[in-house]
């Protein structure tokens, strides 16, 4: 172990090396920078072609040495991709088409005037161009875990260092004891962002102290992210991979581990590629491997690719999979802090949890604890999707209300529809109804109303969603993803799904509702792991807040939202029908024919739907301009 004097010398040398890198990054030769989103969302909507076209235009017009193209991670506004921002102006171009590039290059990058018609509408206020931070999407956000996403080139370690990257690791290794690091994380109030919300500092303390003489310990990262609609961790990995490396190294120092593993989905090819690049760069720069910063601390990281099994989001199943075995949970105790990976003391946190660590070290525990609520500190990243205008990635302080997220950040429900519910926590979570629209979002509030934070998926639903069908959707996912190790989850969720299937087909009874609820509580009480224990949550929350919809399905044999196909009964209201024939023209089953009845004040005979031929596709309702067709 080095002496305090030696460590201070190491720190001085380290700060000098980092300062050189930061100086190179901050004193750019370029007049302008064009940031183009290179995350999965924008990539799928064509950002690589935008970059290619920019490079061609730059080459042809002599801009290569004057304007730099930076391929970044996700900006958050996934709905508007491909996204391109020009600095220093901050002009925000949305849904960029390659045919627009020549005008942007000529008029903006050469002529100095942004092309207003291609800018995101909110960025235009008379002659003043707003920046991305001024949009309604960003105004209420506080980006900590996402601070570098959409800002830096994730494939360049110098850009990360230019944003104080690896400074926290240097401070930890030269100024703090492992106990002081753990106490800082404890004092910050950081709770695990993977779903359970367990205090991160407490988890680290247990791993350090419960087996103090362990010959080896491990630091693991859950980057599997299996919830439908969730892409928070993927975006951090794609936009800021070095923050994960730095944080895992800090965790390794805190608990006394020398090896880390990132368990990442194989279906995340961009994230995997950038992680591999970042790990290689960190090793070359001396920030991973042996004798980091010359302090005598050794720590390295390897990747393990998951095959998409949802159960591997459970910590013991994930560790079993890293070991090369089938991903199945283990009984606890013993907990991973005592016997985890390879039966050695281990800690496991998800990507978002780790992404907060360097900023907590640099800014202090009090800074982080000043944000959020009493028992839920800091911020939370949500993948906002469903019936919402601004689909994308948001990070808000804990305690922000659901209404603020949906209406102010998300832009509200499209097409004038009403908010009905929001699903948080994926298959392990529950539905938040409109009556709790103003609830402050934090761990305890969500649990109190029958939902949970989960990893951060937030699916918004409107009046056209059937809550019985939503419960069935999530339960079907759980049935498919159950590892099958324990009977309550393997058999119980299947029985629950069969009851929901029966109800949505119009064959359910009131006794089925009682049986469904009884099964929910049995599975919660007896399943082996957290995934099985939380699987009934979507059903319980919809039974609690939308019981009337279940009763309509069972008693009236009707789906109020018009979603459950077997319960649809289309009918033409004769007195409203103008006899235009549009419904008949659009019916794929030729189930609509004209009658002899002419309604008062109408000139043509009305139409009729043959229930035997009707395939219940709903095309007729969508085409009728007079609202003469109803789902009875």
Image (cartoon, rainbow, N blue to C red):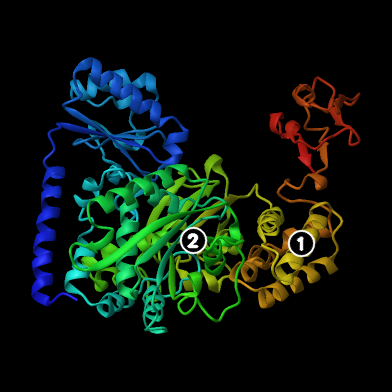
* Residue displayed at 48% across by 43% down: 389
Residue corresponding to mark 1: 494
Q: Nearer the viewer, residue 263 or 103?
A: 263
Compare marks 1 and 2 and give the one earlier in the sequence: 2
Toward which corner of the image does residue 289 lie, by quadrant? bottom left
Q: Nearer the viewer, residue 86 or 632?
A: 86
Toward which corner of the image does residue 290 lie, by quadrant? bottom left
Label 2 Cα neighbours within 10 Å, binned few <14 / some 14-19 / many ≥20 = many
Q: Is residue 203 above or below residue 592?
A: below
Tell me if I can see residue 74 in this picture: yes
Callout 1–callout 2 Cβ contact below 8 Å = no
Secondary structure under badge 2?
A: loop
Label 1 Cα neighbours within 10 Å, binned few <14 / some 14-19 / many ≥20 = some
Q: Is residue 458 above or below residue 121?
A: below
Secondary structure under badge 1?
A: helix
Tell me if I can see residue 144 in this picture: no
Toward which corner of the image does residue 310 lie, by quadrant? bottom right
* Residue displayed at 71% across by 31% down: 626
Residue 455 tag number? 2
Real-space CA distance between mark 1 and mark 2, rounded to the nearest whole angstrom: 24 Å
The location of residue 215, given as percent across then percent down, is 38, 77
The location of residue 367, given as percent across then percent down, is 25, 69
The location of residue 408, given as percent across then percent down, is 41, 51
* Residue displayed at 31% across by 49% down: 280
Q: How many marks?
A: 2
Could you tell me which quadrant the N terminus lies in? bottom left
Residue reaching furthest to the top: 60
């Amino acid at each position: 172990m080095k002496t305090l004097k030696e460590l201070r010398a190491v720190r001085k040398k380290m700060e000098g090396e980092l300062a050189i890198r930061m100086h190179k990054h901050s004193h750019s030769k370029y007049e302008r920078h064009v940031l183009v989103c290179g995350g999965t969302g924008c990539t799928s909507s064509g950002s690589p072609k935008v970059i290619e076209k920019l490079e061609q235009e730059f080459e042809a017009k002599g801009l290569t040495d004057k304007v730099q193209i930076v391929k970044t991670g996700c900006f958050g506004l996934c709905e508007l991709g491909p996204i391109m921002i020009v600095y220093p102006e901050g002009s925000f171009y949305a849904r960029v088409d390659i045919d627009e590039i020549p005008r942007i290059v000529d008029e903006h990058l050469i002529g100095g005037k942004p092309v207003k018609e291609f800018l995101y509408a909110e960025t235009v206020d008379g002659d003043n161009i707003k920046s991305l931070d001024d949009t309604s999407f960003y105004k209420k956000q506080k980006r900590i875990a996402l601070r570098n996403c959409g800002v830096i080139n994730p494939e360049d370690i110098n850009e990360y260092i230019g944003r104080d990257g690896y400074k926290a690791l240097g401070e930890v290794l030269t100024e703090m004891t492992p106990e002081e690091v753990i106490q800082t994380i404890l004092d910050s109030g950081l709770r695990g962002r993977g779903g359970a919300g367990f205090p991160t500092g407490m988890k680290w303390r247990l791993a350090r102290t419960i087996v103090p003489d362990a010959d080896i310990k491990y630091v693991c990262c859950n980057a599997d992210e299996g919830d439908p609609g969730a892409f928070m961790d993927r975006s951090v990995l794609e936009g800021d991979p070095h923050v994960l490396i730095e944080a895992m190294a800090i965790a390794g120092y805190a608990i006394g581990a020398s090896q880390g593993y990132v368990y990442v989905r194989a279906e995340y090819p961009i994230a995997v590629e950038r992680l591999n690049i970042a790990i290689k760069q960190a090793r070359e720069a001396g920030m991973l491997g042996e004798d980091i910063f010359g302090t005598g601390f050794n720590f390295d990281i390897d990747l393990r690719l998951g095959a998409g099994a949802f159960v591997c989001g459970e910590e013991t199943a994930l560790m079993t999979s890293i070991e090369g075995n089938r991903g199945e949970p283990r009984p606890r105790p013993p907990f991973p802090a005592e016997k985890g990976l390879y039966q050695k003391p281990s800690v496991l946190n998800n990507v978002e949890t780790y992404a907060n660590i360097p900023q907590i070290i640099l800014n202090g525990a009090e800074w982080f604890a000043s944000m959020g609520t009493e028992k839920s500190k800091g911020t939370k990243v949500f993948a906002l999707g469903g019936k919402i205008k601004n689909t994308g990635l948001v990070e808000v302080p804990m305690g922000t209300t659901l209404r603020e997220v949906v209406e102010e950040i998300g832009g509200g429900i499209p097409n004038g529809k009403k908010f009905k519910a929001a699903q948080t926590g994926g298959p392990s979570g529950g539905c938040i109804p409109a009556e709790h629209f103003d609830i402050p979002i934090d761990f305890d509030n969500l649990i109190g109303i029958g939902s949970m934070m989960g990893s951060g998926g937030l699916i918004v639903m409107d009046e056209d969603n059937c809550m019985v069908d939503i419960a069935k959707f999530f339960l079907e996912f759980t049935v498919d993803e159950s590892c099958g190790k324990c009977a309550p989850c393997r058999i119980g969720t299947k029985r629950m799904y069969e009851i929901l299937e029966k109800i949505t087909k119009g064959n359910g009874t009131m006794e089925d509702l009682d049986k469904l609820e009884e099964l929910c509580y049995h599975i919660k009480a007896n399943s082996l792991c957290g995934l099985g224990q939380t699987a009934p949550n979507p059903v319980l929350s919809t039974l609690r807040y939308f019981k009337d919809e279940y009763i309509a399905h069972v008693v009236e044999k009707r789906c109020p939202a018009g979603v459950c196909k077997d319960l649809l009964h289309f009918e033409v209201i004769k007195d409203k029908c103008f006899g235009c024939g549009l419904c008949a023209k659009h019916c794929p089953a030729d189930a609509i024919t004209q009658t002899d009845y002419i309604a008062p004040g109408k000139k043509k005979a009305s139409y009729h739907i043959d229930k035997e031929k009707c395939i219940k596709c709903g095309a007729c309702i969508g085409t009728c301009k007079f609202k003469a067709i109803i789902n009875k």
